[in-house]
Image (cartoon, rainbow, N blue to C red):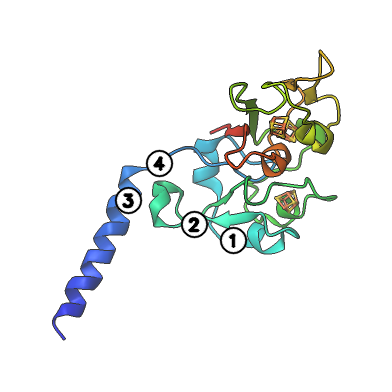
Amino acid sequence: MRKWPAIFIGFLMFYVINIFKGPQKPLVRPPGALPEDEFLAVCIRCGQCSQVCPYHSIHIADGKKGFSIGTPYLNLREKPCFLCKDFHCIETCPSKALVSIEKQNVKMGLAQIDTTTCNAWLGDECRMCYVSCPFYDKAIQLPDFRRPVISPENCVGCGVCEYVCVKDNPAIKVNPMG
Ligand code: SF4
Ligand code: SF4
Ligand code: SF4
């Protein structure tokens, strides 16, 4: 029976240590998120944005994500942001950690192509990311009609390209803003 308090304390310490260690890497926040430091201060960790996302794209960070524990984030390869009409996550946020924004001004991150693994850059026919991007021919362009190139001004970091990339390890990934 005496084992249980020790196990409980062990778990508690694991979480506390992880919280103070800080996040392993920056997280992709939902659209309209305040700059990361402000976001961490303003978000009240209610999880409502996650509950209303029609695509179940928004996760809630656990103790392994350091100070971000309880805050919303996206795993874009698993499920991107589809920039839904009316931005349900922003609309429902009670603390204004997510603020109203025009679709083209969203900045969740910036996509980057690994030209050493991308099929198109290796000479094969592949336009999956290009045709799937919600900002068609703007955020991903084909200057030579073959190889995709990111336009940083137009990419909003929604992650649809990362989601649809045909490679097992996606050749296009979004780097979070934070
Ligand atoms: S904009 Fe819509 S699809 Fe994107 S994270 Fe928010 S609720 Fe989900
Ligand atoms: S390039 Fe990718 S992340 Fe950027 S807007 Fe297009 S689909 Fe979204
Ligand atoms: S979907 Fe992936 S492999 Fe195909 S062109 Fe885009 S980044 Fe390259």
Labelled disc at residue 23: none
Marks 2/4 in contact by CB < 8 Å: the verdict is: no
- Sequence order check, earlier mark of 2 and 4: 4
Tell me if 127 is positioned left or right of 81 in this view: right
Q: Which circle's residue, 3 or 4, is located before the other in the chain?
A: 3
Of badges 4 and 1, the one in the foreground is 4
Residue type at numbered disc 1: Gly
How far apart are the two marked residues, 4 and 1, measured between alpha carbons? 21 Å
Residue neighbourhood size for the residue with mark 2, other residues' Cα within 10 Å, grouped as few (<14), some (14–19), many (≥20): some
N-terminal of the two: label 2 or label 3? 3
Q: Amino acid at mark 2?
A: Gly
Question: In the image, is the residue at mark 2 within 8 Å of ligand 1 by its beta carbon?
Answer: no
Residue shown at 57% from the left, 61% from the top: 46
* Residue picked out by circle 2: 70
When the figure is inspected, residue 72 is found, relative to residue 36, above or below; the finding is: below
Residue at 19% x, 76% y: name it.
Answer: 5
| Secondary structure found at label 2 | loop
Q: Find disc 3 in the rendering and name its residue.
A: 18
Secondary structure type for disc 1: loop
Which residue is under mark 1? 47
Q: Secondary structure at mark 3?
A: helix
Q: CA distance from mark 1 to mark 3?
A: 21 Å
Labels 1 and 2: the sequence-earlier one: 1
